[in-house]
Amino acid sequence: MAMSRYLIVTIACLLSSFAVYADEESDAFNWASGTAAAAGGGTSAEYSATSPAVRSDSIVVEKLRGDGVTFSHDNDVTLLMTGQQKFDDMFEAIRQARHSVHLEYFNFRNDSIAMLLFDILAEKAAEGVQVRALYDGFGNWSNNQPLKARHLKMLRSRGIQIYEFDPLRFPWLNHIFGRDHRKIVVIDGQVAYTGGMNVADYYIKGTPQVGEWRDMHCRIEGSEVNVLQSIFLRAWKKVTGETIIGDIYYNGGSHPLANQKFNPQHEFRGLRHNDSSTTNHMMCGIVNREPYRSPKAVRNFYQYALDAAQDTVRLVNPYFALIPQIRKAILRAVRRGVVVQIMVAEPCDVPLTPDCVFYNVNKLQKAGCQVWVYKPGFHHTKIIMVDGRFCTVGSTNLDARSLKCDYEENVAIIDPNITRQLTEMFERDKQQSFQLLDGTYKKWRSPWQRFRGWFAHLLRPFL
């Protein structure tokens, strides 16, 4: 049964990528031509930081604002660098909810950590707190411990309003595109959580297949909580048909929708403390990808960030399959003299994709990037840090599906202190990684593995 499920999921993923294949065919994946384009300028003139007097963070903010992304300056971001940190902090915040708890995940794995979460949510529902939860139909169906009809019936009987985003129905093909890969939790319209983690115990325990499971999440307080709330409520209406309105749902910072008169903020106690000097004054913007509404949002953010970089780029991403636009932006940065450091994981939770990843980073290393391969487990983190000035935490993988098909969401954090914390994590993780140098790839990967990598990179629109 497990093997059948995996084969069906694989076929579905392959079919889903045909929608983006034609787009990529017009920009063929040819490393030599990509390097030439970087050297010759190509499209880089449109985005590049041509004047060192203009800082990279200013360039990116201006570009994103042109795309409709709003920024506010009254935010506090606390990084949650392990599954234990995320769930301890988030569960404590949920226990203090007074009005509403909203959750939007790719999946809730039917295991001990999800059951603990549902117990806490049921307790809050019994107190009169509104609890609404969404999960993606494909995300649930494709994990090895899905929620089933009996679980949903039990949860609803306990007061948890939980619904499936785009359930899979025969003939299935019409449900391939536009899966909801976001991870958003909003509590009382005042505190939000977002990042790369779903709800599963392997974020704490790891798995026998990959060892430890590294990922990144963050807690946000401030005006951007209202943006995340709007995203959730729009998805809720799409799934249930119910329109949720009221100032009481928007209580983040000084946002115009925040209504302190009718919904005064309350202090959440016992949460992780952020001792940054910019606490409550961080500039952030939510970069939200939705098909038909903002389909290029996250893709543009990464391209803007890479083309604006003036000194250093550090990237961690698990499925480094790369669409041509991002690959070329990386090459342009290298040609400008920017130090580009990339970290990928040696273990992976799916077959073939890591072969493509290793092939790609080997080519990038030859082009001038610095590459580290993380050994202890699967580094599922999705972050970029640029020039020590700004960074992102979110749900987006650097593959065709995330950047061109699915619902995704990242928070752009224009803050040197949070960027420094992520950079320090990157430097620590180097100590548990090996650097890919000239000749390393052939020693590390057997001839058969190198052939698999070459073959896999041809399938990059399908991975």
Image: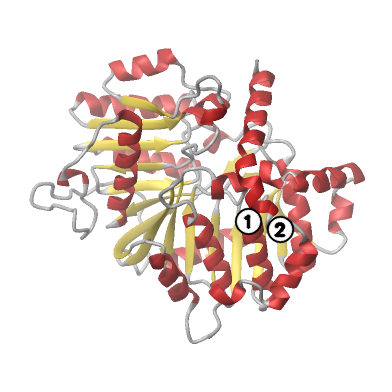
Q: Is residue 324 left or right of residue 231?
A: right
Q: Secondary structure at mark 2?
A: strand
Indicate the quadrant containing the C terminus: top left, top right, bottom left or bottom right. top right
Q: Compared with residue 217, is residue 49 higher up or lower down, i.e. above or below? A: below
Q: Is residue 291 left or right of residue 119?
A: right
Query: Can residue 319 be seen in this snapshot?
Result: no
Which residue is the extreme one toward the left?
261
Rendered location of residue 221, percent (x, y): 30, 54
Query: Residue at image x 41%, y 16%?
Result: 151
- Separation of marks 2 and 1 at Cα, in angstroms: 9 Å
Query: Residue at image x 61%, y 73%?
Result: 44
Disc 1 crowd, CA 10 A, few/some/many (<14, 14-19, 20+): some
Query: Residue at image x 43%, y 52%?
Result: 294
Give the image quarter of residue 428.
bottom right
Residue under numbered circle 2: 372
Mark sitting earlier along the chain (2/1): 2
Is mark 2 in CB contact (under 8 Å) with mark 1?
A: yes
